[in-house]
Image (tube, rainbow, N blue to C red):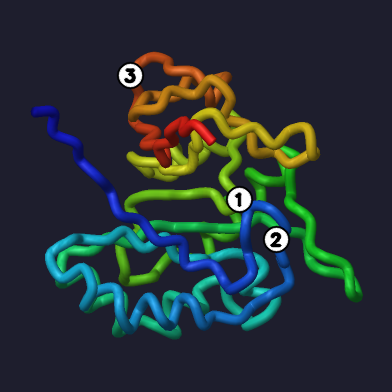
């Protein structure tokens, strides 16, 4: 009998952020609070990976990229003690203007600069963040290569087969392996030579409707 290993991961996103019609201005956290109150009880023997938001949107709204890490510091410490893992989960958005929705910073150079800036703001946090997942599930070769330079050994952003480029969203994982792989230096969707950073995809399956 084949043995399958599962990773249970949780993105600590605010309510209303979905892949079909995301409300990027929403900063209500009822879903996160529910998960923090009940998931350990429901899954007592299963370690979880919590991908914790830390980005410019939280800095703009709450004054610090560390907001969720500091606001729930005791919970994160206890989670780590039970065997859970934390990861960094930034959403790279422009600052909202008026009633307009924030937009994704898709320019690769700007994205690298923003990730670097946020990472500098996370220095000194006494909680380990060994893995990474990009908000809204996209990457460029430059953003992924930056993570490797920053010391991340695992990225878990890819959704193999998902391609939203027709809607001008940067999320495009068409052809990406549906298993862990070392990303090619110039194409995040292709397996390349062994490197320090491993891509662990959010696996996808085809079902007949």
Do labels 2 and 1 touch, CB within 8 Å?
yes
Q: Residue at x 12, y 65 (%)?
A: 45
Q: Label 2, label 1: how many angstroms apart (C-alpha)?
A: 10 Å
The earlier-in-sequence mark between 3 and 1 is 1
Q: Position of residue 133 (x, y in %)?
A: 47, 49
Is tag 2's residue or tag 1's residue first in the polypeptide sequence? 2
Specify whether 77 is left or right of 31.
left
Coordinates of residue 145 in the picture (x, y in percent): 51, 32
Q: Residues within 10 Å of mark 2 (few under 14, many from 20)?
A: few
**Circle 1 Cα neighbour tier, 10 Å, few/some/many (<14 / 14–19 / ≥20):** some
Placement of the N terminus among the 4 image quadrants: top left
Q: Quadrant of residue 23?
A: bottom right
Q: Which residue is mark 3?
A: 194
Q: Which residue is mark 1?
A: 136
Q: Distance between the Cα atoms at labels 3 and 1? A: 26 Å
Q: Nearer the viewer, residue 79 or 56?
A: 79
Q: Residues within 10 Å of mark 3 (few under 14, many from 20)?
A: few
Name the outermost residue toward the front: 209
Q: Which residue is mark 2?
A: 22
The nearer-to-camera label among 3 and 1 is: 1
Q: Identify the secondary structure beneath mark 3.
A: loop
User: Where's residue 155, x and y in %?
Assistant: 41, 41
Q: Earlier in the sequence, mark 3 or mark 2?
A: 2
Is residue 126 rendered to the left or right of residue 43?
Answer: right
Which numbered mark, 2 or 1, is in the foreground of this view? 2
- Relative depth, front residue between 49 and 97: 49
The count of marks equals 3
């Amino acid at each position: 009998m084949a043995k399958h290993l599962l990773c249970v991961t949780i993105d600590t996103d605010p309510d209303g952020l979905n892949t079909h019609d995301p409300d990027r201005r929403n900063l209500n956290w009822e879903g996160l609070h529910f998960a923090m109150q009940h998931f350990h009880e429901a899954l007592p023997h299963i370690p979880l990976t919590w991908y914790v938001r830390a980005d410019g949107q939280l800095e703009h709204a709450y004054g610090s990229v560390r907001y969720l890490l500091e606001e729930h510091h005791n919970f994160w410490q206890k989670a780590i003690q039970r065997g859970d893992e934390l990861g960094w989960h930034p959403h790279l958005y422009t600052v909202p203007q008026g009633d307009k929705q924030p937009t994704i910073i898709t320019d690769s150079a700007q994205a690298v600069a923003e990730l670097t800036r946020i990472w500098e703001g996370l220095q000194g946090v006494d909680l380990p963040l060994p893995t990474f997942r990009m908000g809204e599930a996209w990457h460029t070769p430059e953003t992924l290569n930056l993570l490797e330079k920053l010391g991340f050994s695992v990225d878990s952003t890819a959704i193999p087969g998902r391609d939203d480029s027709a809607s001008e969203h940067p999320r495009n994982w068409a052809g990406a392996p549906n298993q862990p792989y070392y990303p090619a230096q110039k194409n995040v969707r292709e397996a390349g030579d062994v490197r320090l950073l491993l891509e662990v995809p959010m696996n996808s399956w085809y079902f007949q409707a």
